[in-house]
Structure formats: structure tokens, C-alpha cells
Image (cartoon, rainbow, N blue to C red):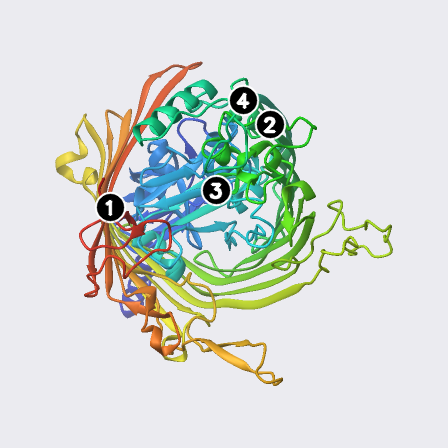
């Protein structure tokens, strides 16, 4: 009886173990796209109500063990709608997943990584490559005009290669730069205007600021993201006070190699010519003024008073605008190849652009190429390189107050001729008369030749499916040469007309390295977290050498420094041997600066509809004293996808609705170097003894500008996303502004750089409406509208009530409480 009982117990135990073993059901299957049937990798598969999960392979397959009493699998992906499938008695389950709207699926580049737009809590505008390839703009930044809300793009003038002024949600700084930070393939871009212009010593041959961004070929750009609020931009810390513009260049794609050739040709002309007086009209009004002033009218044989010693000739009627402008022309060719396989992908491109401007003598040429290669060395290691080299040559002409078209619209009168009777240029015989003849001024030459090299090498290693590390080193190298030449008939020196020439060479080395870990974990069906943390080092080296003394380097007979009037061509820098000439001197300037930065960001998703984010950056810079070497810039954000709630899930009108908000600090360090220390100048000495004199007061407490930013936004999609867009409200308030503050002249100094309690506020609203108006298999019609309004106001001026105290040194602009920054302060007439 006992033996039978033992056998029965053993049988029951084995049966129990067998039942327990079969309580863990194994389910396999494949996940594909419902539209194209393609396998989907990286889809998270979770047993609902448990922590058991799996991830689909590159072929879309999965295998998962399902505990007892569990009967539902949950499939989630960032770009596909979540799907729940009952298990029942199935051991093989194939699932087809549907994409959410294309806009919500869009992967957006952010600082040190990417995010899916649907789950973003920051304010980011994306502009894809179509904006650049469909518009023959002179540079990509000009093509951004009207493409992104809150982005103001202004071209300084119609000159080729001229500066483009970009502001993201207004201007907040007085002495610091108002330009956004540009980042190309993860590497900060040196965006300063490094052109000298030889203004004081050689009659200011030009007055344009150049556009460093004109060196980049816009056809190489895949997309541009504009980071506008603190949640998206504060991870760049002190360099993000004015927003961040991320530029991503094109990469290779697996599959058949695609070769593209784009050729653009066009013409340009002045859109509106100023209606100036002709010679007879000027003569009539001039005589009316003389009579009204109690004088006699000007006769045909009398000299024109107040100007050059010129006898008025009624037969002269010069249209100076016609003399200094022309029809422009453009030719551009782009050739690219794009392809690769699962292991290696490549993108090659080359560009040639030649443009003749609407100003006589203005020419611009860009030649360059790019190579981007990405290689999957193993299942865990990715390697890549991006390399671009562009050469630009810009023949610039005098503008604005320096002559040319500026003089043609001001002090060059229609009664003046272009040439004298002897064939020489009119006006050049008068020592102060160069402004009378813009055509003569156009004979001055200014050539800017720039070679710009971009290189970035990266490596990314995946430790696990959730943890990876990326390191990259980038180089932005600028080699710039400027040559200027002023003919003898356009320059007086010591009572003699002598030609002048100068040359300036600049090398700018911008080295940057980023090193950071990325963590991405789907904890369960309801919780997901991703985080990034690392450090960055930036080093900027500046070296220039120039042969351009203030009043030296005159007496040259040509712009190449090779000939002298006495036949002295033995030296490439030999000035002409005219008795009143001066030898060519030189100077050089070296400087180094940089940043050491630590950054971190974390995003948390609860049930894929409650979103939370936090970021932090610490920047260290030698531009500030030892007391404030580091600045700290945190930000927090949150979002709520309301359309995923039960009360809106079945709505036929609203298919997507998200509310987001953010608050954080950003900074500004763009004030130049050595502002916090005492500086000294060598003097001519006294009584035969050399010496130094202090010319700048020290301020070891100089610290970072800091701005507080608040953003509230709503993203929406209506009628199956046929109408979508966003509306945003923001406030930016900057304080502790860096300013050159006046001091008592009795101290022997004029100003000292300090942080002043001047507060500047920018607040505004942005509206975006995108619509799909008509869509068939062969035809699609879409439209996009964005409207922005920004209000700029100076809130406080630290008790400096005198409007002339905070002078911006830009004409008649001032900083006055209650008015926009840089308001014009003028007498009333």
C-alpha cells in the first residue's frame, strides 16, 4: 500500500512539474509594415501586465515567453501606432503595424541625438532639403526665410556673399552677439565675420560684412533644425541664448547608386530703382533754394558752390545708378552620387557656382566637394567620416558710405560727368572729391579668397541594446586671404596721388570633440526612458598677419606688389620708389580660446502620452574671471498627448493633440576675449625710455549673461492629419547683460566691461498651419503657412536714465527703458 502511495505521489509531482513547465508558453512571430509589408526591426514586444519583453530583429522576427494567466502582447514603436494582440492558443503570431502620420513619425535632430516629433516637449522647427534645392538662394541661410516660425532672416544688401542677419525669437543682448549657434554634423561652426576690410588706412574700400555660411553648399544639406526654446537648446548652454541651428548633411543609402546632376542658370536685376532727380530738375530746385535764401540763381558759366571747383554744364545729365549697376547672372552645377549596402554607405558631391552681381564689378565663385562615408564595422561598432572642402572667391565693390552705389544715391550729383575732357575720371583731381564719382571708386579692388575645410570622424559602440557610446572629433578650418588695391588716381598721400595696396592672411582653426553615452530603455509597456550624458571640448585658434599699415604701403603701381616705378622688382613686397611713398609694414595677431562643457539630458514617457524632460549643461570659458569661470544652465519640460486619452481617442475631428511647456536658462559668452583682465599697450616711450601703459581695467567678477525662457505650445492634427501644425507662446527675459559701461574720464579710461542690471524681454506668438489640399496616387497638393509676432522691450536700465548713457555706437541707436532694444534716438523736426 505504501509503495502504491509513493508511486502516486511521484506521478502527481511529475504531472505538476509538467503543468508548471507548460505554464511558460513560447510565442514567435514577425512584425511588418501594414502598407508596404516590409519587416520592422526594433519593435518592442511586451507581455501586458508584466516586465517580460523582447525586441524584433532586423528581419522583424521575435520570440517571447508568456507566463501563465497572461493572454495579451503589446507591440510599440516610436513611429507606429501601439497595437495589442490576444494570444489565445496561438504559438505563432504575425502582426502588421500602421504608421502614425508622417509628421508625427518625423525624426528630428536635437542636441547630441534624435527624437521622434510626436514625443518631443521642446519647440523645434525642421526644414528639409527641398527648401534649398527648389530655391536658387546665394546661401542656405537666405533660403530659410519664411520657412520656420520665429526665425527672422534679413539680407544686408544685394551684394554677393554679403552678410545675412538671423534672429531666433528676437534679440536679447547688447554687447554680446545676437547670432544663433550653428552646428554642422554635431560640430559648432565658427560664424564670425573675419574680414578686415582695410577700412581706415586705405579709404575703406568696402563696407560689407561677409557671410561665412556662404562657403557651405546648400545642396549637401539633408535637413536643418531650429532649436528655439530652453528645453531643446539649453543642452548647448552658454552658446544657445540666441537659439541653435543644427545642420545635417546628406548621407548614403543602401541600394542602387543614385547619381544626380542639377544645373541652374538665371538672371537678376534691381527690383526698384530710386527715382532720383535728373540734371535739369536738380538745377531748377537748386536755383529755387538759392533765391529763397536771398541769393541769385546759378548761371551756366558759374562754379557750383559748396563742392568741387566745377563749372555747371546744362548738357551733363548722369544717371549714376545706371553707371554703377548691371543685370546679374548666375550659373551653378551640382553633381552627386549616393548609395551603398548594409555595411557601407556613401555620399559624394561637387559644386561649381559662378555669379555676377547687380553691382558693377561684383563677382562670386564657389567650388567644392563633400564626401560622407558610414561603415557598420560590426554589430556593435559604427564608424564614419564627413569631409567637405569649399573655396570661395568674392570680388567686392564699395557700398554704403564707402562709395559705389552708396555715393550714386547720395553725393554724386547728376550734373557731374563720369570723365573729364582729357579722359581722366572726374572728381579724382580734387583731394576730397572721391565721393563725387562712384564709377571711379569701382576701380578699387577688394578680393576675398577663402578655403574652408570641414572634417568630422566618429565612432559609435553599442554595449547593449540599451546602452551605447559615441565619440567624434571635428575640424572647421578657415584659410582666408584678402587683397586690396587702390589706383593712384583714387588716392592722395602727402599731397601726391599714389596707389596703395595691402594683403591680409588669416588662419582660423576650430577643433571640437563630443563624447557621450546614450541610454534607451523600454522598462515595460507603460514606462520608457532615454538619457544622454557626456562632455565636449572646443578650441579656437586665431592667427592673422597683415601687410596693411594705417598710412603705409602706398606707391604701388599694381595690386600684385611686384613692380616699382624705378624698375625695382627684386622683392615681391617692394613698394614703388616714389619720393612721397612709404614702405610696407606688417603686423600679426594670435589668439586662443575655447570651452569645456559637461551636459546631460533625460526624457521619460509614461503610457506614451505623459512626457517629461530635463537637461543640464555646465560651460567653462577663459573669457571670464576665475571667480565665475563656469556657468550652469538647466531646463525642464513636460508634455501631454491629449488625443490618446479615452475622451478623444474616438474623435473623427481631432486625431492628434499635444500640450507642451518648458522653462530653463541659457547663456551668452560672445563678448570676445580678454575682457576681464587688465591690458597694456606699448608706448612710444618717454625721454628715450620704452614703456607700457594700461588701456583696459580688470574685472575678475565678470560673469555670463543669463536668459530665462518660458514656452507653452500646442501641436495639433485634424481630419486624419490633413490639417496640422502648432501654436506657441513664449517669453525670453535676459539679465546681467555684458556691457562696456562708461566710467569717469578722470580715471584715464573710457569704459569697463561689466554685468549691468539691464533686462531685455522678448515675447511672442508663433502659428503654423500645414494642409494637404488634394492627394491622389500621381498628384499631391500641399500648403504651409507660418505667422510670427515678436515684441522686444527693455524693461530696466539699472538706473541709467540718461538715453545717451547706453549708446550702442551704431548711428543714433540707444537703450532706453520702455522701448525696443536699439531704438533710434533723434531730434524731432
Give the CA distance from mark 1 to mark 3: 22 Å
Residues 234 and 440: in front is 440
Question: Dot 3: what SS?
Answer: helix
Residue assigned mark 3: 401
Residue assigned mark 2: 418
Residue assigned mark 1: 827
Residues 663 and 99: in front is 663
Question: Dot 2: what SS?
Answer: loop
Dot in front, 1 or 4: 4
Q: Crowding near pointer 2: few (<14 within 10 Å), some, many (20+)?
A: many
Q: Which mark is residue 313?
A: 4
**Relative image position of residue 671 (x, y in whole percent):** 42, 63
Q: Earlier in the sequence, mark 4 or mark 3?
A: 4
Name the quarter where the C terminus is drawn: top left
Report which quarter residue 323 is drawn in. Answer: top right
Q: Crowding near pointer 3: few (<14 within 10 Å), some, many (20+)?
A: some
Q: Crowding near pointer 4: few (<14 within 10 Å), some, many (20+)?
A: some
In this rendering, position of residue 567 left or right of residue 466: right
Amino acid at each position: 500500500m505504501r509503495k502504491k502511495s509513493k508511486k502516486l505521489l511521484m506521478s502527481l509531482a511529475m504531472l505538476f512539474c509538467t503543468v508548471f513547465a507548460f505554464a511558460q508558453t513560447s510565442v514567435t512571430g514577425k512584425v511588418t509594415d501594414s502598407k508596404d509589408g516590409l519587416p520592422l526591426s526594433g519593435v518592442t514586444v511586451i507581455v501586458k501586465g508584466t516586465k517580460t519583453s523582447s525586441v524584433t530583429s532586423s528581419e522583424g522576427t521575435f520570440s517571447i515567453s508568456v507566463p501563465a494567466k497572461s493572454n495579451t502582447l503589446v507591440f510599440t514603436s516610436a513611429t507606429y501606432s501601439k497595437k495589442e494582440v490576444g494570444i489565445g492558443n496561438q504559438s505563432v503570431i504575425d502582426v502588421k503595424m500602421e504608421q502614425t502620420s508622417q509628421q508625427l513619425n518625423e525624426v528630428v535632430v536635437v542636441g547630441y541625438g534624435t527624437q521622434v516629433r510626436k514625443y518631443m516637449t521642446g519647440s523645434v522647427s525642421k526644414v528639409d532639403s527641398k527648401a534649398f534645392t527648389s530655391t536658387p538662394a546665394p546661401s542656405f541661410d537666405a533660403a530659410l526665410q519664411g520657412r520656420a516660425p520665429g526665425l527672422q532672416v534679413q539680407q544686408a544688401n544685394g551684394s554677393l556673399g554679403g552678410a545675412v542677419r538671423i534672429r531666433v525669437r528676437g534679440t536679447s543682448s547688447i554687447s554680446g552677439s545676437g547670432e544663433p549657434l550653428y552646428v554642422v554634423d554635431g560640430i559648432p561652426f565658427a560664424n564670425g565675420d573675419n574680414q578686415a576690410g582695410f577700412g581706415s588706412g586705405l579709404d575703406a574700400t568696402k563696407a560689407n560684412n561677409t557671410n561665412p555660411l556662404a562657403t557651405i553648399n546648400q545642396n549637401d544639406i539633408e535637413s536643418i533644425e531650429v532649436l528655439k526654446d530652453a528645453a531643446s537648446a539649453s543642452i548647448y548652454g552658454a552658446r544657445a541664448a540666441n537659439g541653435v541651428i543644427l545642420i545635417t548633411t546628406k548621407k548614403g543609402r543602401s541600394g542602387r547608386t543614385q547619381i544626380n546632376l542639377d544645373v541652374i542658370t538665371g538672371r537678376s536685376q534691381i527690383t526698384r530703382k530710386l527715382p532720383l532727380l535728373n540734371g535739369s530738375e536738380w538745377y531748377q530746385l537748386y536755383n529755387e533754394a538759392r533765391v529763397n535764401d536771398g541769393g541769385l540763381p546759378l548761371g551756366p558759366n558759374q562754379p557750383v558752390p559748396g563742392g568741387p571747383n566745377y563749372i555747371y554744364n546744362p548738357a551733363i545729365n548722369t544717371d549714376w545708378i545706371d553707371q554703377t549697376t548691371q543685370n546679374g547672372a548666375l550659373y551653378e552645377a551640382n553633381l552627386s552620387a549616393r548609395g551603398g549596402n548594409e555595411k557601407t554607405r556613401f555620399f559624394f558631391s561637387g559644386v561649381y557656382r559662378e555669379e555676377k552681381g547687380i553691382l558693377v564689378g561684383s563677382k562670386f565663385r564657389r567650388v567644392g566637394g563633400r564626401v560622407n562615408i558610414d561603415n557598420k564595422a560590426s554589430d556593435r561598432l559604427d564608424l564614419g567620416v564627413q569631409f567637405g572642402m569649399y573655396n570661395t572667391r568674392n570680388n567686392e565693390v564699395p557700398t554704403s558710405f564707402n562709395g559705389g552705389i552708396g555715393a550714386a544715391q547720395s553725393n554724386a550729383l547728376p550734373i557731374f560727368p563720369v570723365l573729364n575732357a582729357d579722359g581722366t575720371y572726374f572728381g579724382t583731381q580734387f583731394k576730397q572729391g572721391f565721393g563725387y564719382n562712384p564709377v571711379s571708386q569701382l576701380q578699387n579692388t577688394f578680393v576675398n579668397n577663402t578655403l574652408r575645410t570641414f572634417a568630422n570622424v566618429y565612432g559609435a559602440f553599442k554595449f547593449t541594446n540599451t546602452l551605447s557610446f559615441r565619440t567624434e572629433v571635428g575640424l572647421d578650418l578657415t584659410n582666408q586671404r584678402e587683397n586690396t588695391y587702390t589706383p593712384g588716381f583714387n588716392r592722395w598721400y602727402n599731397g601726391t596721388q599714389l596707389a596703395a595696396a595691402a594683403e591680409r592672411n588669416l588662419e582660423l582653426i576650430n577643433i571640437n570633440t563630443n563624447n557621450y553615452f546614450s541610454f534607451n530603455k523600454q522598462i515595460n509597456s507603460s514606462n520608457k526612458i532615454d538619457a544622454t550624458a557626456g562632455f565636449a571640448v572646443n578650441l579656437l585658434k586665431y592667427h592673422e598677419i597683415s601687410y596693411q599699415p594705417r598710412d603705409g604701403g602706398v606707391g604701388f603701381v599694381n595690386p600684385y606688389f611686384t613692380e616699382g616705378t624705378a624698375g625695382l622688382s627684386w622683392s615681391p613686397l617692394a613698394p614703388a620708389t616714389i619720393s612721397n611713398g612709404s614702405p610696407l609694414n606688417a603686423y600679426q595677431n594670435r589668439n586662443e580660446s575655447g570651452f569645456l562643457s559637461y551636459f546631460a539630458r533625460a526624457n521619460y514617457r509614461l503610457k506614451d502620452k505623459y512626457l517629461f524632460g530635463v537637461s543640464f549643461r555646465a560651460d567653462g570659458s577663459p573669457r571670464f574671471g576665475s571667480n565665475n569661470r563656469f556657468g550652469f544652465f538647466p531646463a525642464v519640460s513636460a508634455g501631454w498627448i491629449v488625443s490618446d486619452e479615452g475622451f478623444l481617442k474616438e474623435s473623427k475631428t481631432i486625431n492628434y493633440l499635444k500640450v507642451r511647456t518648458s522653462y530653463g536658462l541659457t547663456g551668452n559668452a560672445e563678448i570676445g576675449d580678454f575682457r576681464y583682465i587688465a591690458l597694456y599697450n606699448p608706448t612710444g616711450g618717454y625721454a628715450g625710455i620704452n614703456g607700457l601703459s594700461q588701456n583696459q581695467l580688470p574685472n575678475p567678477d565678470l560673469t555670463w549673461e543669463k536668459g530665462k525662457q518660458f514656452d507653452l505650445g500646442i501641436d495639433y492634427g485634424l481630419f486624419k492629419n490633413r490639417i496640422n501644425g502648432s501654436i506657441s507662446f513664449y517669453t525670453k527675459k535676459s539679465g546681467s547683460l555684458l556691457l562696456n559701461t562708461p566710467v569717469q574720464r578722470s580715471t584715464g579710461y573710457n569704459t569697463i566691461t561689466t554685468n549691468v542690471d539691464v533686462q531685455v524681454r522678448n515675447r511672442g506668438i508663433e502659428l503654423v498651419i500645414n494642409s494637404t489640399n488634394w492627394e491622389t496616387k500621381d498628384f499631391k497638393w500641399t500648403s504651409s503657412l507660418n505667422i510670427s509676432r515678436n515684441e522686444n522691450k527693455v524693461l530696466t536700465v539699472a538706473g541709467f536714465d540718461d538715453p545717451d548713457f547706453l549708446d550702442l555706437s551704431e548711428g543714433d541707436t540707444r537703450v532706453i527703458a520702455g522701448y525696443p532694444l536699439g531704438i533710434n534716438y533723434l531730434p524731432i523736426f
